[in-house]
Amino acid sequence: METGLPEGLPVVIGAGDGACATAGAGAVRENDSYHYLGGTSWVASLTDSYRPDPLRRVSVFCAASLNQYVVYGTVQSAGSSVDWFRNAIGVGNNGSEEEEFAALERLAASVPPGSNGLFFLPYLAGERSPIWDSNTRGVYFGLTSAHGRGELARSVFEGVAYALSSNLAVLEELGLAPECVRVLGGGMRSPLWRSILSAVYQRPLLLLERLSEATSCGAAMATAVGVGLYPDFASAAPAFAPLGEREEPDEQAMATYRQSSAFFQNLYPVLAEQFSALNNYLQTVERD
């Protein structure tokens, strides 16, 4: 053989990274939803029919399993917003990355849900869905002399959660409203962030045991199904995507976040024109 591979070696058609992550998250049946939290972040739901958003706020790609599709919305700067805060403003720890993040969590947890009326728009690199605007910029909104480092820190965690929730709202509008959301990615190791997300989503979170290996597990699932070890992805999911803890939303935090999330959703439409004006201004300055 020209390839050097042994004759008879099974060859299986795989899938793209998003499709593999979906399968590896255990999202294998209609309305199964999951949320990946890394440097960027997305929320997604699986459907048995092609269901594009007529307003083009979220996107669709083919799932690893035939005749299934993934509807998803992506926030550009999720974990990277927290990294920006940690690097630019810091927490005064100067230890390892893990120690600094733990110190940042303690700082953010020192203030109540809602960050005492401070909002952070996590548009540090423009924003993808559902607004699709490369002109957007990061914003602290509502800052007063009464706010301190705790509010500055917590509002970043919350701002990312609000932005993701706006994508989840679109999925709900499309009839893809999960009772709970499977979660994975390095950011889900943060107990504080999980509690914020669960309360903002108004839903329980189901943690995967393998928080960081969903994409590779999905590729392994495709191989297992392809060579006949399992008849389909739904049968393979329990072995490849076992569930761990369940995060229940805090009732008091839910009440606060219900109001603050609605307020957050109104900020971009008000600021959109100014984002565009700022971009034009910056281009003028660069030319001069």
Image (spheres, rainbow, N blue to C red):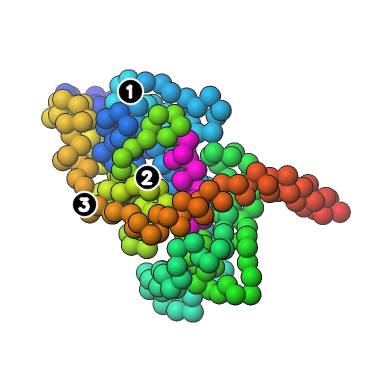
Could you say which is closer to the camera, residue 259 or residue 140? 259
Q: Residue furthest right?
A: 288
What segment is highlighted magenta in the picture? 158-170
Mark found first going from the N terminus, 2 or 3: 2
Could you say which is closer to the camera, residue 162 or residue 216? 162
Q: Position of residue 176 (x, y in %)?
A: 38, 32
Examine the structure image and report whether residue 166 is included in the region drawn in magenta.
yes
Q: Position of residue 151 (x, y in %)?
A: 52, 69
Q: Is residue 69 left or right of residue 169?
A: left
The quadrant of the rendering that contains the C terminus is bottom right
Q: Is residue 185 left or right of residue 288?
A: left
Which residue carries the number 3 mark? 244
Magenta stretch: dominant secondary structure: helix
Query: Dot 3 surroundings within 10 Å: few (below 14), some, or many (20 or more)?
Result: few
Which residue carries the number 1 mark? 48
What amino acid is found at the position of numbered circle 3 in the picture? Gly
Q: Position of residue 22 (x, y in %)?
A: 33, 37
- Mark 2 touches mark 1? (CB < 8 Å): no
Where residue 35 is drawn, which disc sits there? 2
What amino acid is found at the position of numbered circle 1 in the picture? Asp
